[in-house]
Image: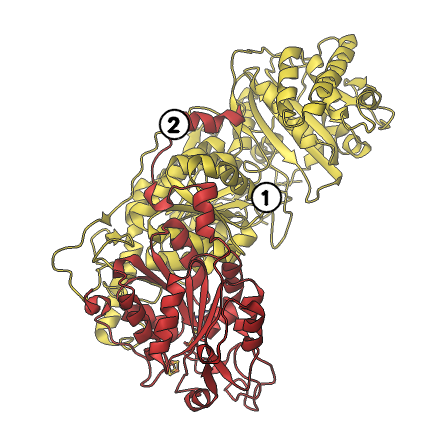
């Protein structure tokens, strides 16, 4: 496949050095490696610096509302399961205003992939505290340092039954691309939380580089949920890689396809036949 | 409200019709009991019996926001010719509890009947010229079960006996209703037969002409809309439970397999509307429905659909608000919200079907408008015609035209790497061709940021630059200009009654129905009155101004405090309506209230 098929004529407007460049590169690389034609890909994003991503990679996309990338992605996937559906947004989007959707999309195991560009601040709105900001973190909204503990998205998602949980780092796009490929190949919902530092408001590149290690280097078994929870709770070190994966649960789309209806909504815009209609009216007579 | 709003005491005016009036070819029945007594099911049985006797029906479900106890009632109006609303007063009251008697006895018409069981209900102030039928409903019911659960069935048998209906039909309908419970199916029929036999000592009290060869179809607007939507190709439905919109969800879920509808029960209404937008963007005909509270949560996303130019159909089955309000009661208070959904200006369409039949027809139209003009279409139903009321439906035509608008199926040869599809191309009618995901070469980003023809942001690096400012204006105009096309498809109000009248009632949506029955009564009393029934609400239909200006005098009838429709009319036409009958207590408008209001206005009085 010609690697240029994903190219966009629009240049990213991110600050030079922003972590999101690494995520964009990793995503493109993953799609090209998997040889997925761009027309089969749908990216749903929210509002934030990170959510500008769809403009920079030429696929079908929806650049929607703050917090709502997942429900849009779910609608697309249910209507047309032949598409590879990816939601991509920031930590404010996904762990703040839209966290409800993350929990329930994971619980229902929709076959959509969520990439969160987690920079521990609200970048676009000039660096306020986000749900993943650390205790003590200084921002415009916490001049004396945050008094609140952060949300741990990985252990929360493991707790609600997510079937694929991984963490990547925008400073290592090759590793990240591998995680995104695994997520796309996974049968079901996948969270790829990406530490994607905001060089303007909260530059944590050095800290991450010092504390990070790779789960695959320490023999972590991604089928072991307890071990995954354990790793997800680590704070002194930053484990990267695949925490947990299980394909035991069917996806929502498989369930509706087999148990409810095999017809794909997008292919079935038609009238009811006279007989179908007569049947539908019967209970009302 | 303005001093010209007439307030009519509902309780007093209900008892108006003399049902001993020989010419009356209709009957009203009210069944009252506690929640959990099976009154809704009893009401449905009676409605079905009437419908299979060739009668037309219109019903109302006076239920409460609880599952057991309290007081619930079911009202059925049936007639030999078309009935529209709840009729006048009560001809037959079945009072299974004391509260049912206390609440309704005073509304029973002269010549009417009260059925009760004196072992449970103490009658008092028994109205004159009303037949007392004290029946041992409990005793009979106890023959069949330890708890007198079947007393409503006994009452149905008794009622049908008094009405001179054929017992075979009564038995058939009851056994159908209990087909899932074979253990009590037979005993319920027997209990009904006992009631029917008991009625014989009273003879037939009021009889209509029944035609047992005619099976009339009846449904409420929630079901009718759901059916119309699926018949028009809708195969994706999303919802979060909320009265009185839930029947749409239940119907879709139970018919999902049969018709291939994928049903998504979202975590909240925000997820619901966004998923519906996603499904629509993917190319499905998709629908979601809710009531006012859920709609409030959906607003930001509806602006999104307008901005991204994604077709969207949303139903709001209105209930009495504000806030939680009266969840099982009716209102038309959400029109203002629809006119002002979300922030800044964007095109939208508002449709307000008047009846279940209308709702069926509206579904297909809503999808066609949404797809042809790529904008949100809002359909306003309400409890009175939705979950709360059945009506006879006729002439449902399943061959609904499906118009999907401009869809490009293939990329032009000059589409090459790096270049996006011109999803927001400037066109004369404002509608740009769209592409469905999966089509090679036509990739685009559906944008909520202001954008150029390719969907590129105008909001960041270009914002404020001369070219971007110009394009912003062009895109804004393009979105809004679509309304001109829609406006050509909007219908002016239907005129009910004579073309020329001394007084014209202006009304909309479901309020049209009680107004019709009021008008029929007023014509009988010699009044020259008619009504304008609005059902295409926005964009405001053309030529309405001249219609309104031709009318001698106007009176607005609707179910909200601030006369929202009258205000819209003023905004769109400059015509100021100065007479009102506004109701906002949660109860449906009864025809008699409109009759009274008209008479008072014509007499020149300004309310009480
Ligand atoms: C409903 C709503 N509330 C607030 C905003 C303002 N807003 C825009 S982006 C943003 C936060 C962005 O942070 P994040 O999602 O972490 O993305 P980042 O910019 O850091 O990539 C907020 C609060 C909005 N657009 N919509
Ligand atoms: S503000 Fe931060 S998150 Fe936004 S583009 Fe700049 S570096 Fe990236």
Q: Nearer the viewer, residue B279 or A189?
A: A189
Residue underneath mark 1: B5
Q: Is residue B33 left or right of residue A159?
A: right
Q: Is residue A95 visible?
A: yes
* Residue displayed at 80% across by 31% down: B97
- B192 shown above or below A199: above
* Residue displayed at 57% across by 29% down: B85
Q: Nearer the viewer, residue B58 or B182?
A: B182
Query: Which color has been applied to chain A in this rendered view?
Result: red
Q: Secondary structure at mark 2?
A: loop
State the CA–CA distance, disc 2 to disc 1: 40 Å
Camera-nearest label, 2 or 1: 2
Q: Position of residue B527 (x, y in %)?
A: 53, 25
Q: Secondary structure at mark 1?
A: loop
The C terminus of chain B is located in which quarter? top right
Q: Quadrant of ligand 2?
A: bottom left
Residue underneath mark 2: B397
Q: Position of residue A156 (x, y in %)?
A: 56, 69
From the rendered image, report the letter of the chain displayed in yellow.
Answer: B
Q: Nearer the viewer, residue A203 or B269?
A: A203
Q: Position of residue B152 (x, y in %)?
A: 74, 25
* Residue displayed at 28% across by 54% down: B438
Q: Position of residue B376 (x, y in %)?
A: 39, 51
Q: Is the residue marked by circle 2 packed among few (<14), some (14-19), or many (20+) residues within 10 Å?
A: few
Chain ID, mark 2: B
Which image quadrant is residue B306 in? bottom left
Q: Is residue B279 left or right of residue B476?
A: right
Q: Which mark is residue A30?
A: none
């Amino acid at each position: 496949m010609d690697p240029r098929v994903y190219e966009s004529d629009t240049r990213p407007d991110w600050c030079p050095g922003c972590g999101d460049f690494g995520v964009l590169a990793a995503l493109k690389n993953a799609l090209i490696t998997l040889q997925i034609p761009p027309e089969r890909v749908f990216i749903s994003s929210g509002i934030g610096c990170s959510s500008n991503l769809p403009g920079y990679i030429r696929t079908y996309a929806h650049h929607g509302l703050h917090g709502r990338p997942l429900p849009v992605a779910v609608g697309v996937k249910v209507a047309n399961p032949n598409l590879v559906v990816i939601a991509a947004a920031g930590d404010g989007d996904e762990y703040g205003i839209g966290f409800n959707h993350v929990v329930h999309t994971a619980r229902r195991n929709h076959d959509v992939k969520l990439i969160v560009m987690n920079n521990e601040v609200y970048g676009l709105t000039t660096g306020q505290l986000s749900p993943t900001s650390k205790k003590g973190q200084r921002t415009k909204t916490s001049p004396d340092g945050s008094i609140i503990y952060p949300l741990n998205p990985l252990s929360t998602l493991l707790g609600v039954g997510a079937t694929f949980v991984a963490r990547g780092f925008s400073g290592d796009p090759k590793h990240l691309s591998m995680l995104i490929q695994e997520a796309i190949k996974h049968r079901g919902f996948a969270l790829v939380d990406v530490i994607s530092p905001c060089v303007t408001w909260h530059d944590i590149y050095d800290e991450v580089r010092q504390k990070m290690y790779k789960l695959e280097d320490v023999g972590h078994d991604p089928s072991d949920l307890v071990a995954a929870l354990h790793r997800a709770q680590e704070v002194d070190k930053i484990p990267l890689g695949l925490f947990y994966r299980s394909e035991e649960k069917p996806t929502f789309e498989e369930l509706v396809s087999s148990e409810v209806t095999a017809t794909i909504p997008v292919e079935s815009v038609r009238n009811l036949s006279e007989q179908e209609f007569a049947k539908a009216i019967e209970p009302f007579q | 409200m303005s001093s010209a709003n007439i307030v009519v005491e509902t309780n007093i005016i209900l008892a108006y019709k003399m049902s001993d009036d020989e010419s009356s070819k209709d009957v009203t029945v009210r069944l009252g009991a506690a929640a959990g007594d099976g009154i809704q099911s009893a009401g449905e049985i009676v409605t079905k019996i009437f419908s299979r006797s060739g009668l037309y029906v219109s019903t109302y479900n006076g239920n409460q926001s609880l599952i057991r106890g309290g007081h619930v009632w079911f009202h059925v109006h049936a007639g030999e010719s078309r009935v529209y609303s709840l009729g006048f007063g009560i001809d037959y009251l079945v009072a299974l509890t004391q509260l049912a008697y206390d609440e309704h006895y005073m509304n029973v018409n002269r010549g009417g009947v009260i059925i009760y069981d004196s072992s449970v209900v103490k009658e008092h102030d028994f109205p004159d010229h009303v037949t007392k039928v004290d029946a041992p409903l409990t005793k009979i019911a106890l023959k069949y079960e330890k708890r007198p659960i079947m007393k409503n069935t006994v009452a149905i048998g008794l009622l049908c006996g008094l009405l001179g209906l054929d017992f075979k039909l009564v038995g058939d309908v009851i056994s159908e209703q209990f087909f899932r419970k074979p253990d009590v199916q037979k005993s319920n029929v027997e209990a009904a037969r006992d009631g029917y036999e008991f009625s014989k000592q009273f003879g037939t009290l009021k009889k209509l002409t029944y035609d047992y060869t005619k099976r009339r179809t009846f449904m409420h607007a929630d079901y009718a809309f759901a059916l119309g939507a699926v018949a028009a190709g809708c195969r994706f439905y999303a919802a979060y439970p909320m009265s009185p919109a839930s029947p749409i969800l239940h119907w879709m879920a139970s018919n999902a397999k049969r018709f291939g509808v994928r049903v998504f029960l979202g975590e909240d209404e925000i997820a619901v509307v966004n998923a519906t937008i996603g499904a629509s963007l993917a190319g499905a005909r998709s629908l979601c429905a809710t009531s006012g509270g859920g709609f409030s949560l959906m607003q930001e996303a509806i602006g999104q659909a307008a901005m991204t130019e994604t077709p969207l159909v949303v139903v709001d089955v209105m209930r009495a608000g504000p806030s939680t309000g009266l969840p099982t009661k009716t209102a038309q208070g959400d029109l203002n919200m629809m006119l002002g959904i979300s922030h800044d200006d964007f095109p939208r369409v508002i449709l307000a079907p008047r009846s279940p039949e209308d709702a069926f027809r509206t579904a297909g139209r809503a999808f066609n408008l949404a797809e042809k003009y790529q904008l949100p279409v809002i359909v306003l139903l309400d409890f009175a015609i939705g979950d709360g009321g059945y009506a006879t439906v006729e002439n449902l035509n399943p061959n609904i035209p499906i118009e999907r608008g401009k869809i490009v199926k293939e990329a032009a040869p000059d589409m090459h790497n790096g270049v996006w599809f011109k999803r927001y191309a400037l066109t004369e009618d404002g509608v740009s061709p769209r592409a469905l995901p999966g089509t090679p070469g036509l990739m685009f980003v559906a944008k909520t940021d202001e954008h150029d023809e390719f969907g590129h942001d105008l909001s960041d690096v270009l914002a404020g630059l001369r070219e971007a400012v110009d394009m912003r204006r062009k895109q804004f105009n393009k979105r809004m200009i679509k309304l001109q096309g829609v406006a050509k498809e909007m219908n002016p109000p239907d005129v009910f009654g004579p073309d020329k009248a001394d007084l014209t009632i202006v009304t909309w949506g479901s309020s049209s129905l009680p107004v019709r029955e009021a008008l029929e009564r007023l014509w009988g009393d010699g009044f020259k009155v008619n009504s304008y029934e609005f059902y295409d609400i926005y964009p405001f239909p053309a030529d309405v101004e001249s219609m309104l200006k031709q009318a001698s005098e106007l009176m607005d009838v609707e179910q909200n405090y601030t006369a929202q429709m009258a205000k819209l009319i003023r905004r769109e036409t400059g015509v100021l309506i100065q007479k009102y009958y506004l109701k906002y207590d949660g109860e449906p408008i009864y025809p008699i209230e409109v009759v009274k209001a008209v008479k008072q206005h014509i007499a020149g009085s300004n309310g009480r």
